[in-house]
Amino acid sequence: MVLGLSGGPDSVFLLHYLAQKAQEGKLSIVAAHLDHQWRPDSAKDVSFCEQETDKLNIPLFVGRASELRLPLKFNGSQEELGRIMRRHFLEMVLAEQKADCIALAHQWEDQIETFFIRLLRGASVTGLRGMRPIHGQYIRPLLNTHRADILAYLNKHKLSYLIDPSNESPQFLRNRIRNQLLPVLHTIDSRFEPGIHKTIKHIADVDECLEQYTAKALQKTITTYTDHQALNLRTFWELHPYMQKRVLIAWLCASGVPFVASERWLAEIIRFLSQPESKTHCVHPNWAIVKKGSIIYCKKE
């Protein structure tokens, strides 16, 4: 397993937890740290992670943002760009080490903060369900663990960790939610936290139901065109507009097309599909959707 190690309290806690499991022979672990190089002293974080992994005899792989070659263009926030770069680097280490999964140290408060970030940005049902304990090649063992319990453990065992100074900056939405919004909500109603937990669980149940409907709709809509897994547009247009978007995303994923989905991006594709002409629409520097009458398929360029 590959552990994403930032050096912060959550990832240091998970490092020690997984190191114990490795000593018990239950798993094999390597750590990976990406230096975003956004701070002049970011090399100190690299040194700290090297020291901590050396103590536990765990291999550490270090990447630098300036050396990454991202497969996608990105124009979003710095926080989102950082997440995309980390994932790209972690997946590179996963492939190189032939590992089974990537472990991330997100905990319960991260889940609540993520819910409000996505709520404010108008996320879909899938977005509002938050992070999943297991999703594809990623696992998050600490999602039901509270930050206070992690800090108590680290302090009890005198384990060092880093504090990212940017965590206090109001420049980032996550920090404003953590430091301004959540304390107020706790003050307003003591039931806030268990209530949010129930809400996220309800949304997850709805999304899982929609995933089943999406899979069935995709099977009805999918067809074969030459050697391609194509979609029949006549069947596609019979779907509810919301299901059209879900089926489109599921089909692109099944076709192996890399993308960062957004409302505007999906609307652009659907506008293209609604045109009567047979055309080609670029959805990625190396991928395009080809429309032939009532059939569409993906082509790698």
Image (tube, rainbow, N blue to C red):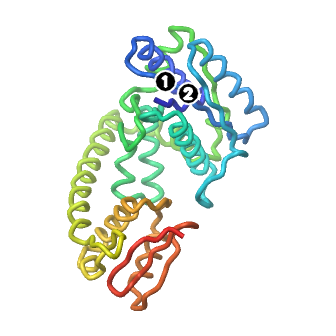
The residues tagged by marks 2 and 1 sit, at their Cα atoms, a distance apart of 7 Å
- Residue 103, position in %: x, y? 46, 32
Q: Quick one: 33 or 167, which is closer to the camera?
A: 33
- Residue 9, position in %: x, y? 55, 24
- For the C terminus, the image quarter is bottom right
Q: Are marks 2 and 1 in contact (CB under 8 Å)?
A: yes
Q: Quick one: 114 or 13, which is closer to the camera?
A: 13
Secondary structure state at the residue bearing disc 1: loop
Q: Is residue 18 above or below residue 208?
A: above
Q: Quick one: 297 or 123, which is closer to the camera?
A: 297
- Residue 28, position in %: x, y? 45, 22
Residue at far top of view: 157
Q: Is residue 35 left or right of residue 83?
A: right
Q: What residue is pinned by disc 1?
A: 29
Secondary structure state at the residue bearing disc 2: strand
Residue at far right of view: 40
Number of callouts: 2
* Residue found 33% across the figure and 64% down from its top: 246
Q: Quick one: 123 or 185, which is closer to the camera?
A: 123
Q: Amino acid at mark 1?
A: Ile
Q: Is residue 140 above or below residue 259?
A: above
Q: What residue is pinned by disc 2?
A: 31
- Residue 4, position in %: x, y? 53, 32
Q: Amino acid at mark 2?
A: Ala
